[in-house]
Amino acid sequence: MGRCRPNLAAWLLLAVLALFVPSSAAVQIKTTDTRYSFHLPLPSGVSGAESLAFDAKSEGPYAGVSDGRVLKWSGRAAGWTTFAYSPNYRKIPLCTAGVVPSEETESMCGRPLGLQFHAKTGDLYIADAYLGLMRVGPAGGEAEVLATGADGAPFNFVNGLDVDQATGDVYFTDSSATYPRRFNTEIMMNADATGRLLKYDAATGRVAVLKAGLPYPNGVAVSRDGAHVVVAHTVPCQAFRYVIRGAKAGQYELMADLPGYPDNVRRDGKGGYWVALNQEKQRLDVAPGAAPVKHLVGVRLDAGGVETEELTAAKGVTLSDVAERKGQLWLGSVELEYVGLVA
């Protein structure tokens, strides 16, 4: 019985071609256009639903906004209602007067960014950029400040946050020890790498520094199995894993290079993650100043960090959060005056 001898030239050609085929070519990337999403306008005078959360009853979304409050969407009849606020909010008249731009008052009144509920207790944890890590009970009201620093260093720009639902521990970021939120552009321009990944131990009330010297750490998401924490780095457009348990506990490893500058990270319904993008990277094959082929505002990664879906939007729209709930995508933005919904 004769044996087929391989064609050496053909094998060499295939090997050369493989070098030029991107690894993602085998993955079908779905594109979802958010231009036709439904909009829930925020109350007059406020903007910037940077992060969204839902409680254990699936009520919400809850959103932190520019005047320092956390609002709750209570349905069409009631609309947005005040759910929580910082200890300073009702003590400082400027916080409620609405006569001074929020950029001037947020350091006093608070600026809630990352939000997440602990389903078992009903507590909402709040990453306030200026006031620190806060918590409010299921009934809402004035939030309690849990921590304002770690290892002798005060927080300077508390940003992303997630809760391990099994332990109640909170993982969060302090994006820079040099620049506060108001000067976040300087973090990128000066390649600042003084950020930290932190953990609030629910049992002891102590905060531990898990990783320091990080370049603009932003959004945080605990994996579905609780084995690691995903951290988005706005610069240099990457996502990393911090391993919580197992033989590699404590390791910080690259998970994915991202096509834009990420903000929040959220678990999706498939074991992966949604990453909101504030802006896409400048492509090398596009002339400087030219409009991008498409405006990316989010990507879905599978559990291994491979991109499987992308979100696009109209020019000028930026996203800070993509929260999946019952097959729907809720869209938050630190700049816009509404919360989006993609059915």
Image (cartoon, rainbow, N blue to C red):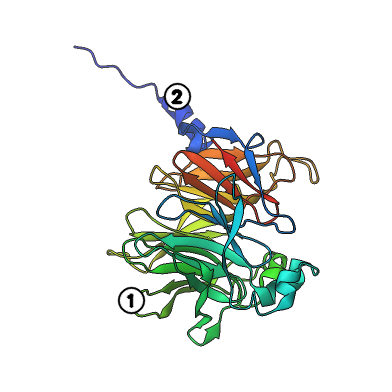
Report the number of discs. Answer: 2
Indicate whether 57 appears above or below 32. Answer: below
Query: Furthest-bottom residue in view?
Result: 152
Image quadrant in which you'd find residue 113: bottom right
Badge number at residue 9: 2
In the displayed structure, does residue 15 sit left or right of residue 94? left
Element type at marker 1? loop
Indicate whether 338 appears above or below 142. Answer: above
Image quadrant in which you'd find residue 223: bottom left
Q: What's the residue at 69%, 79% (across, down)?
A: 92
Residue 280 in sight here: no
In the displayed structure, does residue 42 sit left or right of residue 213? right
**Quarter of the image with the N terminus in it:** top left
Query: Furthest-top residue in view?
Result: 1
Q: What's the residue at 46%, 48% (across, down)?
A: 273
Q: What's the residue at 48%, 45% (across, down)?
A: 324
Kind of residue sitting beneath label 1: Ala
Q: What's the residue at 41%, 52% (across, down)?
A: 57
Kind of residue sitting beneath label 2: Ala
In the displayed structure, does residue 283 sit left or right of residue 309? right
Mark toward the start of the polypeptide (2 vs 1): 2
Q: Label 1, on which residue?
A: 203
Crowdedness of circle 2 by 10 Å Cα count: few (<14), some, many (20+)?
few
